[in-house]
Amino acid sequence: MPLACVVGLCTGCSTWPEEGRGGWAEIYHPDAPSTTNGFENAAPFQVMNEFEHLSLKLDWLKSRGIKHCMPGQLYQAELMLTRINRTLSAQMYAEAQLDLRTFYHQLHQLENHFERVISTTHCGTDTQTDDSKLIGKLETLLNSDNQFAFDSFELTPKYRVNLAQSAELLKMSPGTQVLLVGHTDINGDKISNFELAYKRAESVKSWLTLYGVNPEQVNTLAQGAQVPFSNEPESVQKQHSDRRVNAYILSSSSAASELTKVKPLTEWTRALEDKE
């Protein structure tokens, strides 16, 4: 009888299951998931780009006089910005991305509160004048990764991210006008190239409008294959660069206020000549 009890205790139960019979433990592994599609796994350059974008948005609020209306909330936002900057300096990109997510909502609430305060108290001075920093950032975003595939007017995912950030800046500056000029490579006939170039410019405009930009802020133009990106000999790389949409910024100035639906191209021609 004692021997039977010992045998029963030794063979009845064990601390681990047989191979292939682990139950739920084999389905739900205790380790973290191997996917890297989460926002906290963004590439370092994406985190830095988002940080620069939110920093510029805070600078824009300060230029409108938020310090005179809401100094306490502005101080909290600046503390958060400093924290993220130090985290990025330490190359702790995952932690910085988490803080950026919080900072994004903090800035969104701050902007909404500031708009309500301005509408009721008029404590801030709305200085929507030429802002070289804003214009420079807009031009960089709109003219980066702006190439298209052959015979296509669909935007790349990376360019759509740039347009989303550009839309945030344009919504903060309703007096800023944008001219989108579509281009194609040398392949194809002249009429088809002009149609494709116009579709590319309109596609960029539709995405900006989808992100909340006023359609009256954006004008489109097509130049087909008349203005190549460079004068280099024809190659696959050159043709890829030729398939693009260039963006030109006319800031909130007297020239922008004079733009009408009847004759905008006169002002835009002058702006393009100044760029050249």
Image: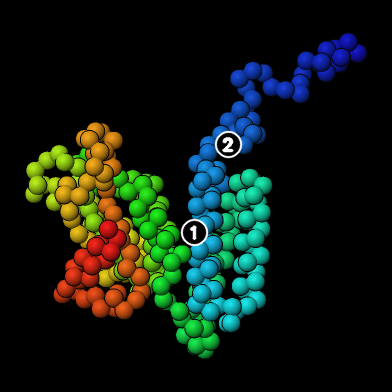
Residue 216: percent from the left, percent from the top? 27, 71
**Circle 1 or circle 2, nearest the eye:** 1
Q: Secondary structure at mark 2?
A: loop
Callout 1: 10 Å neighbours few (<14), some, many (20+)?
some
Residue 229: percent from the left, percent from the top? 26, 46
Callout 2: 10 Å neighbours few (<14), some, many (20+)?
few
| Residue 33, disc | 2
Residue 49 appears left or right of 233 = right
Residue 224 appears left or right of 140 = left
Residue 95 appears left or right of 161 = right
Please tell me whether residue 184 is drawn above or below residue 247 in the rendered image: above
Write down the quadrant of residue 51 in the picture: bottom right
Residue 142 in sight from this viewpoint: yes
Q: Quadrant of the C terminus?
A: bottom left
Distance of mark 1 from mark 2, alpha carbons? Answer: 30 Å
Residue at the (61%, 67%) spot, across then down:
77
Residue 154 appears left or right of 79 = left
Q: In the depicted view, which residue is nearer to us: 87 or 143?
A: 143
Q: Report the residue that reaches farthest toward the right.
A: 2
Residue 179 in sight from this viewpoint: no
Q: Secondary structure at mark 1?
A: helix
Residue at the (60%, 46%) spot, across then down:
93
Residue type, numbered disc 2: Pro
Residue type, numbered disc 1: His
Residue at the (52%, 89%) spot, across then down:
121
Residue at the (57%, 66%) spot, across then down:
106
Residue marked by disc 1? 53
Please tell me whether residue 264 is drawn above or below residue 208 in the rendered image: below
Write down the quadrant of residue 69 in the picture: bottom right
Q: Report the residue that reaches farthest toward the bottom.
A: 121
| Mark earlier in primary sequence (1, 2) | 2
Residue 269: percent from the left, percent from the top? 21, 65
